Amino acid sequence: MYSVYLVDDEALILSDMQRSIPWYEHDFQLVGSSTDPRLALHEILDLKPNVVFTDIKMPRMTGFELVKALREKELECEVVIVSAHEQLDYARQVIQLEGFDYLIKPVEEKQYTELLDRLLKRLEKKYPHRNLPATGSSELNAIIQHLNRNLVQKSNLAQLAQQFNISPNYICSLFSKHLGTTYSAYLTKIRMEQAARLLAGSDAPVKEVALKSGYEDYFYFCRVFREYHGTTPTQYRTRK
């Protein structure tokens, strides 16, 4: 599922969005929310959700300031502005910040449903489905799908376990039983496959390929790539 974070300074609105919007039915899951945009900024940078919904007028930091800060940190996420104020200047700023949409409160459930359908199409183009292994475990299938869709995120086994409400040991046992491998080995595998695809199919700098494959440390990425593919990223691209 694709991950969503909500920001609104009114707790009742946040609660209503969490309860009334059919997130799960449209392949989305909430990973966090906050009434404090400054706190939200730190949590979003840590969680790296696929989508951020935010109000505009909030104390201490506006929604636009929040989105600008996320863009400055080069966080790749879709942004949906939800505001009670309809102004042409706001619409312009949404466009400038590469926002996905601008909704005016009160928002009907049908509007949210249509929005989620469009968001899903955008994200599936951005992170195309790969040939994922089908296992005998629905839990493991969901975990595999999540990992493949969120390669750029820092994947911590403890956080993953918390997200799926199961223990880290149980996750490890699922990988061992159904795929005959470990969690970390599988994660390295899909990241290395992603890196190989990017190197062969684009002219992106190797540092950018590393980041898009989930590695912030460029030198560590090169070392892992060489161990996995038997050649350096640059040599791999030249051969292809």
Image (cartoon, rainbow, N blue to C red):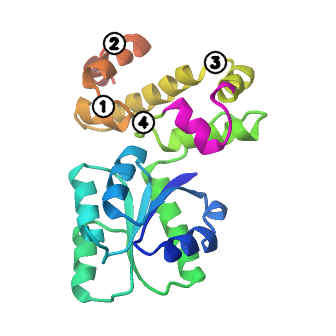
The residue under the point 57% across, 75% down is 16
Residue type highlighted by circle 4: Lys
Q: Is residue 89 above or below residue 158?
A: below
Q: Is residue 131 visible?
A: no
Residue situated furthest right in the rendering: 136
Q: Disc 2 and disc 3: Cα gap in Å? A: 23 Å
Residue under pointer 4: 154
Q: Is residue 163 magenta?
A: yes
Asked whether residue 126 is drawn in magenta, I would say: no
Q: Amino acid at mark 3?
A: Thr
What percent of the width, then of the height, locates residue 169? 67, 25
Q: Is residue 134 above or below residue 48?
A: above
Which residue does the numbered mark 3 point to in the structure image? Answer: 181
- The number of numbered badges drawn on the structure is 4
Dot 2 or dot 4: first in sequence order is 4
Question: Disc 3 on helix, strand or loop?
Answer: loop
- The image quarter containing residue 53 is bottom left
Q: Which residues are magenta?
A: 156-169
SS under mark 2:
loop
| Amino acid type assigned to the residue bearing label 1 in the image | Glu
Dot placed on the residue nearer the N-terminal end, 1 or 3: 3
The label number, if any, that marks residue 231 in the structure image: 2
